[in-house]
Amino acid sequence: MSGRFSKKTADSSPQRVLAAFKVGVDNVIFSVDTTLNRVLVLLVMRQQEPYLGQWCLPGTLVRQGETLEDAAYRILDEKIRVKNLYLEQLYTFGNPRQERGVPASPSVRYLSVSYFALVQFEAAELIADGVSGIAWYPLDQVPLLAFDQNRILQYGHRRLCNKLEYSPVAFDVLPEVFTLNDLYQLYTTILGENFSDYSNFRSRLLKLGFLQDTGVKVSRGAGRPASLYRFDANAFAPLKDKPLVFI
Amino acid sequence: MSGRFSKKTADSSPQRVLAAFKVGVDNVIFSVDTTLNRVLVLLVMRQQEPYLGQWCLPGTLVRQGETLEDAAYRILDEKIRVKNLYLEQLYTFGNPRQERGVPASPSVRYLSVSYFALVQFEAAELIADGVSGIAWYPLDQVPLLAFDQNRILQYGHRRLCNKLEYSPVAFDVLPEVFTLNDLYQLYTTILGENFSDYSNFRSRLLKLGFLQDTGVKVSRGAGRPASLYRFDANAFAPLKDKPLVFI
DNA sequence: CCAAAAGTGTTCGTACTACACCCATGG
DNA sequence: CCATGGGTGTAGTACGAACACTTTTGG
């Protein structure tokens, strides 16, 4: 039997002490500032002990009658107003030594179900309630977070990169119409400069046929005007769960 | 603002009724019978109400001082003896209407953190404790499970297929040495016959260079004897998080 | 000798890479 | 007219799909 099972304490006494839980949802909310080429994550400042005054991920405890996803959307709604977004469950962390501010019952464990979200930076409007701090942090400048949440963030970042490669998340977070350069900027900002050549990225995506050229041109300063494209979800459907369409 | 946010009830009364939770871990444990070409999942029969006598995924409530992963391994240890296995967290389900047998406190919600496991079928030995039913079910013959767990199973099956394509899980569940046909059988059983031609599968994997030919030949009935190979984790390391090495 | 299983090789088409090059606009 | 960004084309290479073929065993 492998060493992995060393914890096995063949004790099967009928009643063992179960853990009692508070369940919270913590969101890793990303956005992308393509003009400054930065990936941003939304942080809030803690208003209570423990970790008072320290930055952390926006989170909440789950209420009665509320699904986990409900709770995740609720935090989002409390912190930012957005037009489009993508949200999905990320991972569940349940460190037994990590208790959260529930002073009345010190033996209650805190379980964190984390959600991953990607929102449109330009259209996102932070809701400052006057008291609490809230800010977009560039991913490479994130400080030490409360509750060891940097691990969650790291997890979320991996998910962000993967999602971009495998799924059409990008279009959930781009405007209705966009130039191919907008799309390319989003990809390079998240995946780094060396994921693909622009012209190759271009022709690969166009060949797949789910980007409709609207015919409308838009001029951004100097240079030839660019076509505006629209994502065609129907045309994309057959490519669902085909691997790696976007790299 | 999108319709997605219709739940937003601008009520921010300071104290809302938080949900209290029992947290359980439920395992989706797969194994592969390559001789009969079947993917199997481990089910146990419920011994208590609700859903008494109905099949379900092996699960447990999380105890004090125990991590989620601890709990997942504990269930495994209680149900089967295995040599090698792969285990990772799958998804967390928290339906607020789905209560679990905690009759003393009807308002306590049940939260299910599910884990995905893959074990070696040949070396797995089910632990029958005389009372409870336990069995490997072929994936296409799984009955209606308690607590709507078929959703979890479906989720686990998707993960199984993806894992096989992206990561070297297969080697966690094959013997130390194996023939290329053993490996191929594992893949076809899980992914279906039409994922790749044997000879192409062969040459692709060998070219990648993380399979060491031990030189030892093994003869299985008629036909030319096959070489036994060994997975070289070091040689594989540089291919980590390179996409789609196995398809 | 033949069937069965292991292993090798070949052909063909497609897809990615890395560029070079043309186009349209603002200053 | 030229710098700037948008867009097209091409040569070389690599790789996967399909399938023919050789090798080595047991009966």
Image: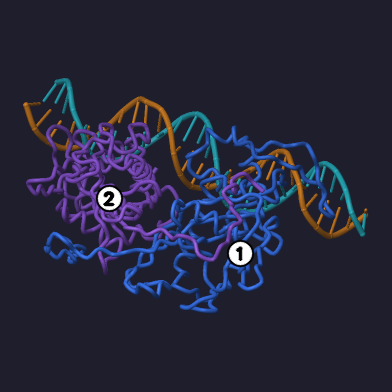
Chain colours: A purple, B blue, C orange, D cyan
What is the chain identity of the residue bearing mark 2?
Answer: A
In the image, B213: left or right of D27? Answer: left
Horizontal and vertical percent for residue A124?
15, 48
| Closer to us: B136 or A54 | A54
Q: Where is the C terminus of chain A found, in terms of image quarters?
A: top left
Q: In which quarter of the image is residue B105?
A: bottom left
Number of dots carrying numbers: 2
Horizontal and vertical percent for residue B63?
46, 57
In the image, A244: left or right of A63? Answer: right
Q: Which residue is drawn at 57% across and 68% down?
A: B43
What is the chain identity of the residue bearing mark 1?
Answer: B
Horizontal and vertical percent for residue A236?
35, 57
Q: Which dot, 1 or 2, sits closer to the camera?
A: 2
SS category of the residue bearing label 1: strand
In the image, B195: left or right of A163? Answer: right
Residue at numbered disc 1: B40
> Around disc 2, counting alpha carbons within 10 Å, would you say few (fewer than 14), some (14 to 19), or many (20 or more)?
many
Same chain, labels 1 and 2: no
| Closer to us: A132 or D25 | A132
> Around disc 1, counting alpha carbons within 10 Å, would you say few (fewer than 14), some (14 to 19), or many (20 or more)?
many
In the image, D15: left or right of A70? Answer: right
Does A36 appear above or below B222?
above
Residue at numbered disc 2: A27
Does A188 appear above or below B132?
above
Which mark, residue A57? none
Which amino acid type is shown beneath numbered disc 1? Leu
Q: Which residue is drawn at 36% across and 38% down?
A: A200
Horizontal and vertical percent for residue A31?
23, 44
Measured Cα–Cα span from mark 1 to mark 2: 35 Å
| Disc 1 and disc 2 in contact, CB within 8 angstroms | no
Which amino acid type is shown beneath numbered disc 2? Asn
| Closer to us: A111 or B182 | A111
